[in-house]
Image (cartoon, grey):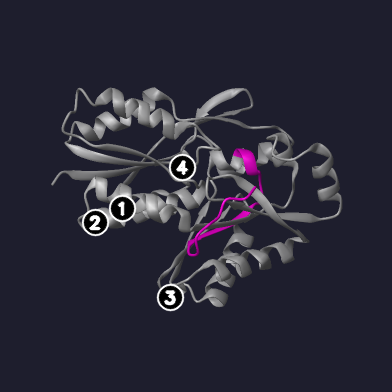
Amino acid sequence: MRKVQIITDSCSDLGRDIREKYGIDYAKMSIVMQGEEKPAGLDWDLYTPEELYGVMREGERVTTTQVPAGEFQRIFTEYLDKEYDIVYIGCALPLSGSVNTGAVVAGQLKDKYPDAQIFSIDATNSCLGEGLLAVRAAELRDQGLSASEIAAEIEKEKHNVNQFVTVNSLDALRRAGRVKASSAFFGNLFGVKPIIISDKIGQNIAVKKVKGRASSIDELVNLIKEAMTDPANTTVFVGHSDCEAEGRALCEKVKSETGCKDVYFNVIGPIIGASIGPDALAVFAMGKPVETVG
């Protein structure tokens, strides 16, 4: 049986530690910050989280690009030349067209690599929800499943990824066009903190509004606890956008109150961070099926 490479993209927010542990690679997107386009690297080798989120705290909008076709050509060919099959798990289609671009490039490479299989899977998630699925795919690979078997299993399991996110300010979401200016103004004025989910088709939707930061963090814990079906065997993924102390406190709260197996903690990367802004907190875990909202 052919070897299998799991590939994700810059939206997965997986740190080098977990990528190396599970043998996961990623295709890079880009950001445009202060008028300059830069790769959206998950290892923060060209700029730091403090620099990215600092620019946003000063009121500047950071924009993003999807994975270009040339990047897919590069990374797919690297592994196809080594006789790997590929399972690419990409950002939710409502947020990025990268999965479609990956599928087009895979089709173009078929003539050159007729024996290879390349699967381009819409994670219907982003951030560490997408990363969680990439880790799951790597676990299945290490259990001996083929690329087609992994793809089929991920297609089934992806709708069980639960996401709950809160932000401290609505300003970045306003600049990214996610909320109206008037809603952001009054939300910030009255301390309203939305709870944002990713629904079954990958739409990010605010499903609750909570008054105050502490209450919103408590709500993240309550919701992820309620969503999990087998906490003793579940790893919760926790992300923060340059609010590490609050993120670590959230990790401890998740551990103590949910009875989960483990917690993986990482900073939210450049692509997701550009939309959600600084001081966001997010929790992700496998659990109950997610439904379509709206």
Position in image of residue 222 (x %, y %): 62, 70
Mark 2 and mark 1 in contact? Answer it, CB < 8 Å: yes
Position in image of residue 163 (x %, y %): 56, 56
Q: Earlier in the sequence, mark 4 or mark 2?
A: 4
Camera-side mark, 3 or 4:
3
**Quick check: can you spot residue 56?**
yes
Disc 4: which residue: 42
Q: Earlier in the sequence, mark 1 or mark 4?
A: 4
| Label annotation for residue 188 | none
Disc 2: which residue: 142
51 relative to 166, above or below: above
Q: Alpha-carbon neighbours of circle 4 within 10 Å: few (<14), some, or many (≥20)?
A: many
Viewer-nearest residue: 275 or 59? 275
Disc 1: which residue: 138
Q: Alpha-carbon neighbours of circle 3 within 10 Å: few (<14), some, or many (≥20)?
A: few
- Compute the Cα span from label 3 to label 4: 29 Å
Q: Earlier in the sequence, mark 3 or mark 2?
A: 2
- Compute the Cα span from label 1 to label 4: 18 Å
Disc 3: which residue: 232
Q: Amino acid at mark 3?
A: Ala
Q: Earlier in the sequence, mark 1 or mark 3?
A: 1
Q: Secondary structure at mark 4?
A: loop
Mark 1 and mark 4 in contact? Answer it, CB < 8 Å: no
Q: Amino acid at mark 2?
A: Asp
Is residue 118 shown left or right of residue 94? left
Q: Amino acid at mark 1?
A: Ala
Is residue 180 shown left or right of residue 41? right
Quadrant of the rendered image containing residue 49? top right
- Compute the Cα span from label 4 to label 2: 24 Å
Numbered range of the magenta stretch = 274-294
